[in-house]
Image (cartoon, coloured by chain):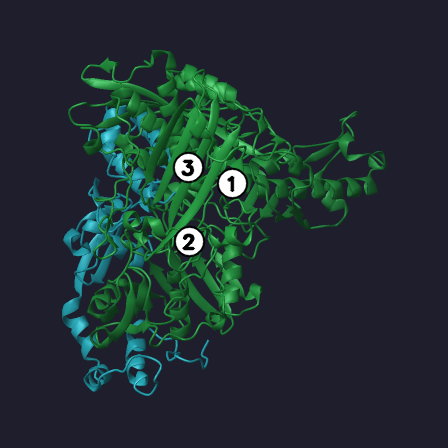
Chain colours: A green, B cyan
Amino acid sequence: MSRLIFDKVIGDPMNRVDGRMKVTGAAKYSAEYALPGLVHGVIISSTIAKGRIKAIDSKAALSAPGVLAVISHENAIKVPGFADNEHPTEPPTGGQPLRAFYDNKVYSNGQPVAMVVADTLERARYAARLVKIQYNEDKHKTDFDTNKAQSVLPSQAKKNPKSPLADYTRGVKDGYKTAPVKLELEYIQPTEVHNPMELQAITAFWEAEDKLTVYDKVQGTKPTQQAFAKEWKLPVQNVRVISEFVGGAFGNGLHNWPHETAAIIAAKMLDRPIRLMLTREQMFFMVGYRPYTWQKIGIGASPDGKILGITHESIGQTSSYEEFTESTLQQTRMMYTSPNVSTVYRLLPLDVSTPIWMRGPGEATGAFALESAMDEIAFALNIDPVEFRLMNHTDTDPDKKLPWSTKYLKECIQTGAEKIGWKDRALKPGTVRSGEWLIGFGMGVGTFGAHRGAAAVRAKLMANGSILFQSAVTDIGPGTGTAMVQIASEHIGIPPEKITFQLGNSDFPQAPNQGGSAIVATVGSAVVAACTHIKEKLLTMAAASEKRFTGVKMEDVLFDKGELSLAKSPSVKMSYIDILKKQKLTELDIIQDSKPGEEGSKYSKYSFSVHFVKVMVHPVTGRVKVDKVVSCIDAGTIINKKTAANQIIGGVTGGIGMALQEAAVMDHRFGRYVTKDFADYHVPVHADVPKVEVYFTDKPDYIVDPMGTKGLGEIAIIGVAPAIANAVFNATGKRIRELPITPDKLI
Amino acid sequence: MNKKLPGTFIEKKQPDDSRRDFLKQSALLSGLSITPSIALKAANEHWDEKLAAAIEKTSLQLEINGVQQSLSVEPRVTLLDLLREQLNLTGTKKGCDYGQCGACTVHVNGKRILSCLTLAVMQDGQKVTTIEGLADGETLHPMQEAFIKHDGFQCGYCTPGQIMSAVACIREGHAESEDEIREYMSGNICRCGAYPNIVNAISEVKKGGKKV
C-alpha cells in the first residue's frame, strides 16, 4: 500500500489547478457576483411548527429606508409550475417539496414565510425585524421518541416490493434469534447538520422576461437548470445556472430549496438582480440535515465466531410533505457472510423540514450501528474484532450473489491494524493507561457503491497546442477540476499546464450532481472518451499529410507531449500544432458523451474503507481525545494522492464530529432547534483533529470505469464514528449507543 | 429590460430612487402590500433619504490593502459587510456573522480580528489587510504558497480566514509546536476538514523563518 505523506507519494500529488484563486480570494462564490442594480433579500422564517399564517403586517417594514418590497404568499407572483399537480423541483425520493410563498400553510418551524428586499443588506435585515406575522397555530409533532410508533413503509417500497427500501430477508427471517450467542442493541443517530462554511446563497436575475440566470450554491448545475426550467415553464436553455465555486455542501446542494425560488420570485417582481444569503441559524432548518435515526440490530453468532444472523431495523425522520429516504441498511446485506439477514426500513414523518443526504449518507448512519454491533458481539465472544471481521469476510456479494468487481478490504484491515499499533490493544477494556488517560483502540469498516453515470464533455484543441475542456459538473471541494486535468493529460498527451478544465456552468455539457462519490468515474470517463475522439481525428488528419500514418491503427501510435508518433519508429512524428496548421484549422472542437456499458452489471461494485482509531479518555472529566487515525482505502486508482488524501482526512474529521460533537437539539414545545450556531452546535476544530494517516490500495478497477477508479468521498466518513465509539469502549468499558459521545455520557 | 409583468413596478434606476418609485406606484398597483398615505407623503418628499443622509451615515477613513479610502457608511455596517458588499472585496468570507467560525478574519494594523464582530466605524484611521492584499503583486505570500503545496483547503471558502489567521499566529509567536498551532488556529473552522494539512503549511512557513 502506498503511504500518504506528501514527500513520499507514489503517483502525482499535483497542486490544485484552482489553488491560486482560492488562496488569493479571487475565487467567486454565489453571493459574490457584483451586478448592476443588485438588491438584497432577507428571509423571514416562521416561528411556529404547524398552522397557518393569519396576517402579515409589513407597513413598518415598507416605510423603512431603502425597502423595496415585502414578499409573501399574499403578494408573490404565481410561479407557473406551482399550478401543476406535482411540484416541478422534484424531491430526491418522494412527496412534494415546499413551494415558496405558495399559500398560508406552515409545515415546520423556520419555514420561509416572507422576504424583505432592500437596497442594502443592513436595511433589508433591519426591515425584516419590523414585519409582524400572526399565526393560527395547530398542534405539532416533532418529537421522534414519542411518535416512533407511527413510522411507515416508504411509498416507493409499497409500490414496488423489489425496491431496496422494502423489507428484505436472506435465509431465515430474524435468524439471529436461534444463534448460541446473540445480542439485541439499539442505536441513535441524532439530527446532524451539513453546515458547510459557505452559507447557502443565490444571486438571481432575469436577463429577459423568459430568461433566468442564477449563481447558486448547488451540487449540480444541470439538475438545477432542469428544476427551474420546469418550475418557471421555460425552455431549458433559457435557464443558466452558474456554480463555479461552491463553498462546501456535503449533500445540502442536492436539493433545490424554497429560498432559491423565493429569490427568483423577488428578482422577477422587482426586475432586479437579487442576492440572498441565508444566516447560519437558517442553515439548520432550511437546507436539509442528516435525519434523526433509530436503529436496532439483532446479531447472533456461533461461539467460534461465525455470524449466523443479522436483523437490522431503521426508522429515519422525514418531513410531513416529502419522503426522504437513504440507504441505511444496504451494507448489512452485503458486508459479512451471514446466512440469515433481515432488514426493515421505515420513515417517521414529523412537522419538521426535509432532510437531505449528508456525507456518507445513510451508509454512515447504518455503519454506526452495524460496526458497533460487530464490536459488541466480538467482545461477547471474546474474539479480537479485527479477527472477527476477517473470519466473516466474504469473497462474493452474498446479497446480489455476484463477484466483486474488486475488493481489497482484507489487505486494508491488515495494513490498518499494523499501522495503528493494534497489537498494543488489550482485549479487556479499561486496562491500558498513559498517565491519567485511558487508552483505547477501535476500528470500523465502511463501504459505498462504486457508481458511474452518464456525462458529456466538450474538448477544444487549440492551434497553439493547448486544450480546453468544459463540463457542467460542480466542484464542491474534492478537486474535480484538478483530477480531470490529470486524467486528460494522461489520455491526450498534453502537459497539465496546457490544459484548462472549465466547470460549474449549465451552458456546458451534461454532468450529474456532484454526489455519491461518482464524479471522477462519470465525468472522468467522458474526458477519456473525448481524448480518444480527438486522438482519432488527429491520426486521420495526420495521415492526410504524412503517408506513413496512413492505415495505422490507434494502438500503434503514441500520443505524448503534444505529438503523435509511430510506436515502432518514434522518429515518425507530428505535433498537434502542425496537424491543425496543415488542415488550416484554428481549433478542433468536439462534444463527447459517455456512459457505462453492460459489462458492469455482471459484478457487484463497491469501494471499501477501514478506519482505525486510537483514543485517549480522561476518566474524571470524560473528555475524549482522538489521538491517531489510520484510514486504509480501497477506491481503485487514485488520480491525485494529495487531493484524495485530503478527502479522506476531511471525511475522518466529519466522522470525529459525528462521533463526539454533533447533534441538533430541538425544543419540542416549539419544534425549534436550540442549537443554531457554532457555539451550541459543535463541529471539529483544529484542536480536535490529530494527524490522519491515509493508505491507498491504489489497485485499479476497470470494471467500474476506464481509469479504474471507484470513488472515495463517502467511504472517507463511513465507519469512522463506530471506530471511535468502539475505541471509547475499549478505553473505558462504556458502550455509548447514542451519538454524540459527549463527556456527560462517560462520567 | 422594462416589461409589463404582474408585480413588476420598478424601472432600472439607482437604489435610492427606486424605493420612492415603488412607494408612489404601489398605491396604484394592487400587487404588493398597501402603503399608508403617510409613507407615501414621506416618500414623495424624500424624508427618509434626507434623514439617512443627515444622520445615518458617518465618514470613515480606512487604508485597505495599502490604498487610502474615504468612505461614508452607516454605523451599523460591519467591517465584513463593508468589504464584501460595498468595496467588492469578497475574498473575506461570511460564515456565521457571530464570530464563531473565523472565515472573516482580516488584519487590522497587522493583527488578526474578526471583521464580522467589528463595526467599520470602529476602525477609523486604521490599516486593514485582507486576503486580496496579502500577496506582493504576483508573488504569493509564503503562507499562500504553503497552503497550495500542502493542500490546506478543499472548497476554499474558509481559506482566506485560515491564511490571515495563520500569518498572525506566527507573528504572535503561537506557532512554536503543532499542538500550539492547533490551539491558536481553533477559531478558524474548516468544515471540509483540511486541518492536518493547514497545520503542516503553518509549521513549514514557521520553520522557513521568513518574515511573514
- Of callouts 1 and 2, which one flags the residue occurring earlier in the amino acid sequence? 1
Chain of the residue under label 2:
A
Q: Residue A511, position in %: x, y?
A: 57, 50
- Of callouts 2 and 3, which one flags the residue occurring earlier in the amino acid sequence? 2
Residue A278 disc label = none
In the image, residue A485 above or below residue A438:
below
Name the foreground residue: A16 vs A295: A295
User: Badge 1, how many Cα within 10 Å: few under 14, some, many 20+?
Assistant: many
Query: In the picture provided, is A464 more to the left or to the right than A384?
Result: right
In the image, residue A372 above or below residue A106:
above
Q: Secondary structure at mark 3?
A: helix
Numbered marks: total: 3
Query: In the picture provided, is A523 more to the left or to the right than A650?
Result: right
The answer to which image quadrant residue B41 occupies is bottom left
Q: Residue A325, position in %: x, y?
A: 45, 49
Q: Residue A330, position in %: x, y?
A: 49, 38
Residue A168 disc label = 1
In the image, residue A222 above or below residue B182:
below
Query: In the picture provided, is A55 more to the left or to the right than A326?
Result: left
Q: Secondary structure at mark 2?
A: loop
Q: Which residue matches tag 3?
A: A366
Query: In the picture provided, is A449 more to the left or to the right than A657?
Result: right
Gap between marks 2 and 3 measured at Cα: 28 Å
Chain of the residue under label 3:
A
Tell which tag, 2 or 3, sits nearer the viewer.
3
Name the foreground residue: A691 vs A170: A170
Q: Residue A416, position in %: x, y?
A: 43, 19
User: Badge 3, how many Cα within 10 Å: few under 14, some, many 20+?
Assistant: many
Q: Which residue matches tag 2?
A: A217
